[in-house]
Amino acid sequence: MENNMNAAALMQKIMICKFVLLETGMFLDTHPANQEALAYFVKYRDLLEQLLKEYTTNYGPITHADFNGGPTWNWIDEPWPWQNREA
Amino acid sequence: MWNYQKSLQYPVNIKNPNAALARVVISQFGGPDGELGAANRYLAQRYTSPYPEVTGILTDIGTEELGHAEMVCAIVYQLTRDLSMDEIKKSGFDTYFVDHTTGLYPQAASGVPFSAAAFQSKGDVITDLHEDMAAEQKARTTYDNILRLADDPDVRDVIKFLRQREIVHYQRFGEALRLSQDRLDAKNFYAFNPEFDTKRNCK
């Protein structure tokens, strides 16, 4: 149970970081030389990398490439992101 | 959630423009058995999928089809680059050109715009997987027909790759159907619909 709560909290941080990167990336598309935005992007990119490593090591893959070498292909394990209840 | 990757699944490098061929190839972007329909078919069906293997394969193939739509668009784009007005008139591309210039618009070769009416999301895993297997074969036939019409080896190489993927997808959907039927009543596969009647207890 505690594990699941940790996973959910970590996933929420990942979702926040990804949204920050998406929003900043779109801003940078039209302001490609904005130094403040570039630094902001790098800061959250580095944070996202740490969070993704922690999540995928402990709770399962977010992309195929996150497979951690277990005995089965846990990519297909439920819940899928739209299944907002315990599988 | 999807992330765009700035690479094609398979390289598209066409040297010679050919507007007449572009008019045919565009059917696999927005035609009845095209990649846009394929991606949306599988990605729509997966939400109510009752078995994780099926959810996985619908997600993964649906995602790959988005990449195939990009490849088909890359072919059409490269076939319609640097066209003279004379080539546009002589090739019959003028009827497309008048509405879209050389912009990419999802339509069939006949000119009929993309329509979701060409695919189904039925909410029944057996029905949907049969639809999906048929869809892969229809796309395979379309690519076979494009190969009958296309002489350019640069185009044929990419079309052959896409055709081969239809065959692999057909195989995977067939396996998904078998996995599904293995979990149902062998005496009557239709005794209940695992996508509706029992959501969680039919593993």
Image (cartoon, coloured by chain):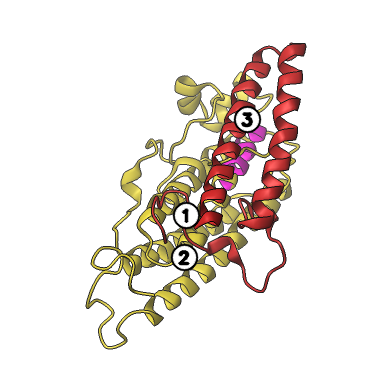
Chain colours: A red, B yellow
Asked if labels 1 and 2 share a chain, the reply is no
Question: Does B123 appear above or below B191?
Answer: above
The crowd level at tag 2 (other Cα within 10 Å; few <14, some 14-19, many 20+) is some
Chief SS of the magenta region:
helix
Q: Is residue A5 visible?
A: yes
| Pick the front one: A39 or A73 | A39
Q: Chain of mark 2?
A: B
Measured Cα–Cα span from mark 2 to mark 3: 42 Å
Q: Chain of mark 3?
A: B
Asked if labels 2 and 3 share a chain, the reply is yes
Residue at 52 percent across and 63 percent down: it is: A77
| Pick the front one: B74 or A66 | A66
Tell which residue pokes out farthest to the bottom in this image: B187
**Location of residue B66 by image quarter:** top right
Q: Three-letter amino acid code at disc 3?
A: Thr
| Residue designated by label 1 | A80
Asked if residue B14 lies left or right of residue B89, the reply is right
Question: Residue A68, percent across and down?
Answer: 71, 62
Q: Three-letter amino acid code at disc 2?
A: Pro
Asked if residue B84 lies left or right of residue B115, the reply is right
Tell me the SS state at disc 2: helix
Q: Which mark is residue B80?
A: 3
Q: Which mark is residue A31?
A: none
Q: Which mark is residue B52?
A: 2
Question: Does B179 appear above or below B45?
Answer: below
Highlighted range, magenta: B68-79
